[in-house]
Image (cartoon, coloured by chain):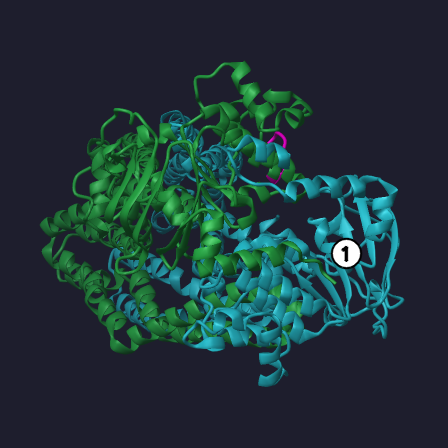
Chain colours: A green, B cyan
Amino acid sequence: MGTPSKNGISRLLQIAGRRTYLLILSGLLAVAHAALALVPYILVYYILQQLVQPAFDQTMVQQYLLWAILAGIGSYLLLYASGMASHIAAFNILYELRAQTAAKLGQLPLGFVNSFRSGALKKIVADDIERVETFIAHQIPDFVKGSTLPLVTIVYLFFVDWRLAAISFVPLLILAIWMPIVFNSSTSREMLKLFHQSQEDMNSGIVEFVRAMPVMKIFSQTADSFQQYSGTVNLFADSNIQYLHRSAPPFAVFMSFMSNATLPILVLGTYLYLENGVSFSTLILFLMLGVGYIKPVFALSNLGMQLMLINKGVERMDTILNEENQDNSGSSISPSQFTVEFKEVGFSYVEGLKVLDQVSFAVQEGSITALVGPSGAGKSTAAQLVARFWDIQEGEIMIGGKNIQAISVNLLMEHVSFVFQDSFMFQETIYENIRMGMDRSEEAIIAAAKAAQCHDFISDLPQGYQTRFGAFGVHLSGGEQQRIQLARAILKDAPILILDEATAFSDPENEHLIQQAFGKLIQNKTVIVIAHRLSTITQANQIVVFNKGRIEAKGTHEQLLNQSNLYTQMWNAHIRAKEYTIS
Amino acid sequence: MNMISNIRYAFRFDQSGIRKAFLWEFLHGILIAAPSGILLIIIWELFKESPDLNTIWITLAVMGGLFLLQLYVAQKAMISSNEATYEMSRRIRLALGNKLQRLSLGYYKKRDPGELAAVVLQDVANFENIFGHSVTNIANAVFGTLILSSFLLWLNWTLGLSLLAALVLAIPLIQLSKWLVEKYGSKTIAARNTTGARFLEYVQGIQHIKSYGMTGARFQSLKQALSDLRRESIRTEAIPGPFILTVGVLLEVCFVLMIWLALYMLSQSTLTIPVLIAFLILGYRLYEPLKILMVEYPILSYMNLSLSRVISVLEAEEQTIGQDLVPSSFGIEFDQVSFSYVEERQVMNQLSFTAAMGTMTALVGPSGSGKTTITSLIARFWDVSEGVIRIGGIPLTDMAAATAYTLISEVFQEVYLFDDSIYNNILIGNPLADEKQVLEAAKKAQIMEFTDDLPDGLDSLVGEGGSKLSGGQKQRISIARALLKDAPIILLDEATASLDPENEIYIQQAIQELVRDKTVIVIAHKLATIQQADQILVLDKGHIVESGTHDVLLDQKGLYARLWHTQQQASGWKITTNKKIAEAAD
């Protein structure tokens, strides 16, 4: 990639530049097609000219008719070739842009990718990139055709008779000067602004109306919300109609000029012909060709609107492509031990808004450290940082005494497993979903499944381990998917584990099964657990209490009960919550 | 769905506007065709031995006049057809708004709200934009062809028919290419869907993919899908292309053959020179409308898809209401109720129970046993296929929707918050409530616990969709709404309390306030929370397998007792590498 900082049309041309030769070929073929498409007009001109000749040569004319048919066939063959060249270029470029964007997503920090909704990313890759096709496959050839051919025609006509050529140009000239003035006038711009404003209002009104409808129904307030909704709908329709009344006159002028474009040529031409200023055949030539060439020019007039849409899509794609890759240049030598240490770590997602500040704690190899705190205190962020979801701005995070930023992401991933609340299943067999590309024997996979308490339900599936998940296969309950995730982690057997304790509660009916799987997984590992229910972590070697991005206290459960007010408060609330019954 | 009938459906929304639009478009069509006629008259005149100057200048003056007339008519045509389009869209949007109010809550469960909003937003806009833009082009094309072909047929029907023959011959070719476009297009769409699914898998699972070092392998399979999409896209262009373009060739050939025929007729003196000139000049233009239609057709079928979606919402089935009765007591009764979401799979079979007014009934059972279905049926998300559900002795189907809604409050996991203050979000529960009542509800729902820390207190904004609040905080706002609404029946999912484990205690207290003196149906996951229920229904596969109070059910030593004991074990669970403690808890 060159410099991706360009935008607008130059960025689009840069993208098109990936297939320059194909596109030039397509453009040349398009011009040739358009030239041959003039043949019927020339043919009519020729015959009309022959009709006034005293000796009308029928055989000669028939020869021309034959050529005209061949030209017609040739013209469409060229059109097909041009279209294929531009489409092949376009689809290849789409392929490259998509693959490149996907590859890029694989290289960016996980946190960046997770900060998008997956639907939004899909929209960029599927729809926004698709729009580039219009530009490359259609607009480029159309533009070449629409601009070169009229140019060639008008130059030719100027050679034949400059006066008629000049006057044929008049309607185009008037419109070219006058239209922008009308559409750029301040009233027109203001109305357009009003139009866009009312459209935005209506759009957000509609989204809210639809999304809130169930709530409104439940609270019997549909009438009020409908009134608001119909207000925005009416305002939009009214401003639409208002803008229509404003833009109709210029449009009418445009249409009238277009369909009467022969008038100036007719008037001047007839006058000149009667005054013997031009020959009969010249006049006919102008009447045949002098109007036709204008049309393609106007076809270009709505190019701008479409370009705007395409550009918006490309801009969204560029926000991904321009994002900086995570530095993966670190060493690929494994750390020899697996302690985890936070040293004065400071981190913020957005500049100026610190999520973690001066966070320091150490986790001994083979011990369990629980991160606790009110929601939003920073405990999840801290856990994610160990896996380099994001790179920190201040301090250091060390594994076995090595700064994790000096360890390549791939290597780091080999040593760290995480089990988070969202389990994810691929549309593959259950077997492959556990194996996850790891080089492990079937026995090992089944052993992992047994340890994770999945073996029984997997064996009950129609094709056991070979059952496909999703689409045309089976679906599993949240708790079952969670256990598959645990089986993966057990199979991977990484020395450092980062867990979200809530995972264990994803399926209240089968909690104990997940808990057993958890127990198998954490044996002999260095464990960092994000904890919500304090009673599950009272046995942890160390509990780190987070509050507003800082560490409030550290210690064992008993120590904290004596030392930390916040912890004691949380503990009491938790115990009361545990004993809760609805009455 | 059929395009013509869909468009006619849309026309119903502004019939008089459409009629006016067609009239003006027709007049405009004549004026668009007129210059060709003028051109013809002048060329005829010039071909004469001694052209009559007067005729020429008068004709040109008429053309000038028509030009001025067109300035007016074009404006009228554009305004009337676009006004009709905007008017139809306005009325369609309002009709959709009306319809959305009448659809059952079940409809909203079934459809993704984003997708539904897109119908009102995008699909109507598609109709508006495409129809507004295309109607003029198509009207011109149709009216232009009609006027021109009648004129040419009147001049010489042999030559006229030989030109029109091309249009007839084109039909099978167009059909064939349409069929090919659909055939290969559907392959492209399938490839596009596969790519989309692969890509979603890639981004949604990216942390799992990365952590197992599978980036390369997964990326390859995505790349393969992208490459398949490229191949299918190119084929969809390449294969139908020649057939579509053959239509163009056909038109060219027919035009040339017509000239051939005309010249032959001229030599046989069965054709006069002026008529030949007319066909030379006007003949080729006869095909222009067809070319326009071919360009507009794909856009129109895109519009038609949008229109079909709009119509399917407008025509969606509504729940019927028999008598408009209002119950005076609030016990709930299921009488031999059967229900299935899809025809052949019954999820509930002849289920009966009563929940007396002011008591608490807990629903217990494995996932998929029908707990949620029962609460959904009480809220009349769906209608039962057999049997009756009654509130205070009155069947649900004999209550106006508005009546039923005032009787029931739900506390489920999803909460919809407006981008407004906390205060106004609570007020939704009862817009007539005064400040004192709102404050009291907020207090009871434990909202003050977190608003006291906020600079604007209850007037703090919640952000879009409540983005500035935690799950538990949103949940408490929804409970405050329900408190303010004070409906006699409460439907509750006990798991909502665990949404935000750090704030569990507050939600529990809020729920406690809400259920006081109400008829309560609670979906229970943690059995400990519902020990005091007046009635526990144990469900399995859509049947009630056990029922009674906690103590009675424990004594029965059935499914409930089994569930209870496993849960008791699980609740003592501790994360630890210390084997002794782990085993003790096991």
Three-letter amino acid code at the position of disc 1: Leu
Q: Is residue A474 above or below residue B39?
A: above
Mark 1: few/some/many CA within 10 Å (<14, 14-19, 20+): some
Q: Is residue B553 left or right of residue B256?
A: right
Magenta region includes residue A384: no
Say which residue label 1 marks.
B377
Residue closer to the observer: A529 or A149: A529
Q: Which residues are magenta?
A: A471-478
* Disc 1 secondary structure class: helix
Considering the image in quadrants, where does the C terminus of chain B appear? Answer: top right
Residue A422 percent coordinates (x, y): 51, 42
Determine the residue positioned at 20% across, 54% down. A283
Q: Is residue B24 visible?
A: no
Determine the residue positioned at 61% across, 28% down. A454
Residue closer to the observer: A359 or B19: A359
Residue A55 percent coordinates (x, y): 23, 38
Residue A519 percent coordinates (x, y): 55, 32
Magenta region includes residue A477: yes
Q: Is residue A350 above or below residue A388?
A: below
Q: Is residue B40 left or right of residue A367?
A: left
- The subunit letter for the residue under badge 1 reads B
Q: Is residue B243 above or below residue A214?
A: above
Residue B423 percent coordinates (x, y): 53, 76
**Majority secondary structure of magenta residues:** loop
Determine the residue positioned at 54% across, 29% down. A520
Q: Is residue A201 left or right of residue A520?
A: left
